Image (tube, grey):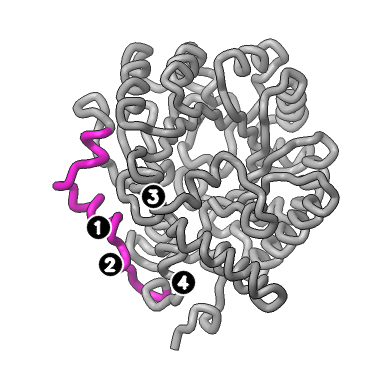
Amino acid sequence: MISITRLLCGSEYYGDQLRYCNGAGKEIYGTSPGNGPVVIWNITQSCNLNCKHCYASSEAKKYEGELSPEEGLTLIDDLAAFNVPVILFSGGEPLIREDFFDLAYRASKHNIRATISTNGTLITPEVARSIKKAGISYVGISLDGIGELNDRFRGREGAFEQALAGIRACREVGQKVGLRFTINRHNFHQIEEILYLVKEENIPRICFYHLVYTGRGKEMMEEDITREETREVLDLLMEKTVEFHRMGQEKEILTVDNHADGPYIYMKVKGKDPEKAQEILELLTINGGNRSGMAVGSINSKGNVYPDQFTHTRKLGSIKERTFKEIWTDQENEFLANLRDRKPLIKGRCSKCRWLDLCNANFRARAEAFTGDYWESDPACFLSDEEIRIG
């Protein structure tokens, strides 16, 4: 994640403690020395929607072989023993899982920061109260457009209004809630409207996700935005972040899954405010760029462990056979060792980039989906050859 708010405005939020703490970029087993990684756990693959970009290819059906309630509770105990700071309950749609609140309570009992990624359509006022009571610290609700555009993208009429009702239900009970927006050709022109919604609904946080070509998202590869359009999006987000800050209506605005955003922000600021740019450069250096397989890990609904939620071609092990810690710290796993020291393996323009230490070769799952080679350049890098000093 790149926190535009932190870089441009200096405001700090919980996640910044993990992203920009001393030693973060050099820690290979977690977010920082002494801590395990942030874990995205897809607690079920079942979903009540059918989103075009779903990396889990979820459908409205029951999937066999998912972790039992007992296995789920044991997993949380194991993650606590490994000092995992955050569990992101995801799916599918996590609220479909019948024992979701049992899992949330167990995470809270261990003082693990529990968050949820949801489409929001199942959050009634009663469910919002239950989420708050269970100790969920943050609810991220996915919206990929306004009104009918969101409904088309998510495969169900009325999904936008139901998600908006879920947001309002969370706000009503004092539950922190924010938006998740996946940028693509069909919706990037609505980003300003989404930011207006954030302002009008008093939503404190929004994450803009760059498209990753896995699951059904691979079918949208040709529907990603261009490099020029990506730059326009970043310019708009930077402008609006500062505008919110100046108005005293500060919002936590982040981008996700494209670490080229960091050098781009640095270069844009450098010409106007060299002192601020130096602060940004220092923060990006501390962070260390993409840290899949280090600061971030993923577990699917069947208990299989992966470097991140998009890299399902690289299974690291199963928590039905070994604990998460044993899998994550396995020094004989050649792929994990390579991922944690990836720079010598990186190919193409990424290998020649002067920002490699800040970006860490960006998103490997996207490179593999586009080229068939896990170590090739990330096709979503929007920096020019001149900006990365090729040739």
User: Which residue bears the numbered disc 4?
Assistant: 355
In the displayed structure, would residue 178 be above or below residue 238? above
Query: Dots 1 and 3: beta carbons under 8 Å?
Result: no
Percent x, y of residue 128:
67, 17
Tell me the residue at 55%/73% (across/down): 383
Query: Dots 2 and 3: beta carbons under 8 Å?
Result: no
Q: Which mark is residue 292?
A: 3
Give the mark, 1 or 3, whose residue is nearer the N terminus: 3
Q: Which mark is residue 338?
A: 1
Give the mark, 2 or 1, whose residue is nearer the N terminus: 1
Q: Residue furthest bottom?
A: 391
In the displayed structure, would residue 112 be above or below residue 132? below
In the displayed structure, would residue 346 be above or below residue 176? below
Residue type indicated by callout 3: Ser
Q: Which mark is residue 345?
A: 2
Q: Quadrant of the C terminus?
A: bottom left
Q: Which residues are magenta?
A: 325-349
Quick check: is 244 in the magenta stretch? no
Give the mark, 1 or 4, whose residue is nearer the N terminus: 1
Left or right: 51 with respect to 178? left
